[in-house]
Image (cartoon, grey):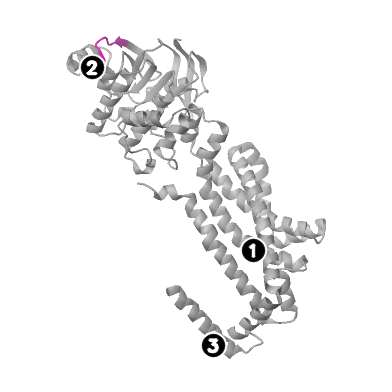
Amino acid sequence: MELEIDIARKAFRLAGGGERLVFDHFALRIPEGATVALLGPSGCGKSSLLRIIAGLDRDFSGAVHGAPQRIGVAFQEPRLLPWRSVADNLRLAAPHLDNSALNALLMAFELEGRGADYPGQLSLGLARRVALARAFAVEPELLLLDEPFASLDRALHLRLRALLTQRIGATTTTTLIATHDLDDALLLADEIIFLEPGPARIRGRLPIVTPRGQRDEILTKIRASAMIYYVMDAPGNGNQEDAS
Amino acid sequence: MTRLVSIVLFLALWQIGARLLGPHYLPEPVAVAGAMIAEARSGELAFNLGMTLARVLASFSLAMVLGSALGVALGRLPRLDRLVDPWVVILLNIPALVVIMFAYIWGGLNEVSALAAIALNKLPNAVVTLREGARALDPALDEMAQVFAFSRARRWRHVVAPQLAPFFAAAARSGLALVWKIALVVELLGRPNGVGFKMNEAFQLFDLKLLLAYALPFVALMMLVESFVLRPAEQAASWWRRNGA
């Protein structure tokens, strides 16, 4: 089923009074089975959009149609239960997992031997992987990944991206990835939706036809094709908006 | 080792003080030990300690269960909190003695009134602590549980309860100290047995030996409960904080 998002209006109240308009007559259609990257500077409403689709934010006027029951979400922070082991964190979200499925899952996310660890013992990179594994574990009909590589150093970022590229390639689940990094979007998605802030507007949609495995070699070329829509995230600019 | 030295030093000071003040003001440790043994032989000591302990445990459990339930409800429902908060503040500030007297006057001099009076004195304390705990629940984890469709039972057991456990343990620890002190007053005012009753008897007779013979074992008992039950429980409640980064 196609995902239909129509947000007539969504605003956040600001601490100092007044409000910030995030969406104003915003509409988006996502075909079933597509892997779509939402690309835009920080504060342009990517996370808000994912939260609305996930049903976590109902304080808006408009409607979302076609959002399935089983949704797998990887939040920007891992959001694991610190008092439960990695294996239990996965099983609590996905009770159907038996031991062999659990081990296969840990293997797929390069978490072998980590099942008994507690989240406090994991680095951020590993905790992220557990959070991603949890999102995939529920066999979702819709996957929402919010900045899956935020706050990771360059090397970890690349490694996790390679891993996630494989995982996404192996499913046919409708997937939405929020990111501010052009290369992430180019390597992971079938289609990039370029967003610009204040209130969010779709600047353009760019389908990527090259199969995922072959994109690394021609990255420079496809990067050039994205430049017509892409607005650089000015240093410091986006973060200020986040804080407001 | 240091503890042992400390106890020996305490006994030595007591002995010296007793010599200086004389038995009418402070009986010697040996005399108190004698009275203690006499009470123990007759079975009086065990019986009265047992009665008080039973009252402490019953009213403590009652206050913790009701207080926690109410505290969590208030922490989760701000409108209910605004309604009930003034009552909690009043109850927190009413002198224990007043609560006890009203309980005896309204309910009669019986066990139920006694337990209610003790529990009611502890209740607001548990309410306030658990309310803080419920307010501090992490909304991020709540959202996670919602997205992954945790059932109600699963959410309570795996998401909410572990976050409340340290608050519950803190309320329990501070609560026991409060409850046993109040239990003695309740017994003194209206019960025919228990440590508080015996202390009253000793006071009437100016029998300081008897007073101390009951006070010391009871304090020791409460210290044992505190260090072997409550403190380990409190540490167990937040073990996962130390288990990691």
Residue pointed to by mark 3: B16
Q: Position of residue A20 (x, y in %)?
A: 44, 24
Q: Position of residue B19 (x, y in %)?
A: 58, 90
- Mark 3 nearby-residue class (10 Å; few <14, some 14–19, many ≥20): few
Q: Position of residue B4 (x, y in %)?
A: 46, 76
* Kind of element beneath mark 2: helix
Kind of residue indicated by mark 3? Ile
Q: Which residues are magenta?
A: A205-214
N-term mark: 1 or 3: 3
**The residue marked by circle 3 belongs to what chain?**
B
Q: Residue at x 37, y 15 (%)?
A: A172
Q: How many marks?
A: 3
Residue pointed to by mark 1: B180
Q: Is residue A101 left or right of residue A67?
A: left
Q: From this viewpoint, is residue A136 visible? A: yes
Q: From this viewpoint, is residue A80 visible? A: no
- Mark 2 nearby-residue class (10 Å; few <14, some 14–19, many ≥20): few
Residue pointed to by mark 2: A213
Q: Position of residue A64 (x, y in %)?
A: 49, 15
Q: Residue at x 65, y 56 (%)?
A: B60
- Mark 1 nearby-residue class (10 Å; few <14, some 14–19, many ≥20): many
Depicted B177 relative to depicted A94: above or below: below
Instruction: Report if residue B230 lies within the magenta region.
Output: no
Instruction: Report if residue A213 lies within the magenta region.
Output: yes
* Kind of element beneath mark 1: helix
* Quadrant housing residue B190: bottom right
**The residue marked by circle 1 belongs to what chain?**
B
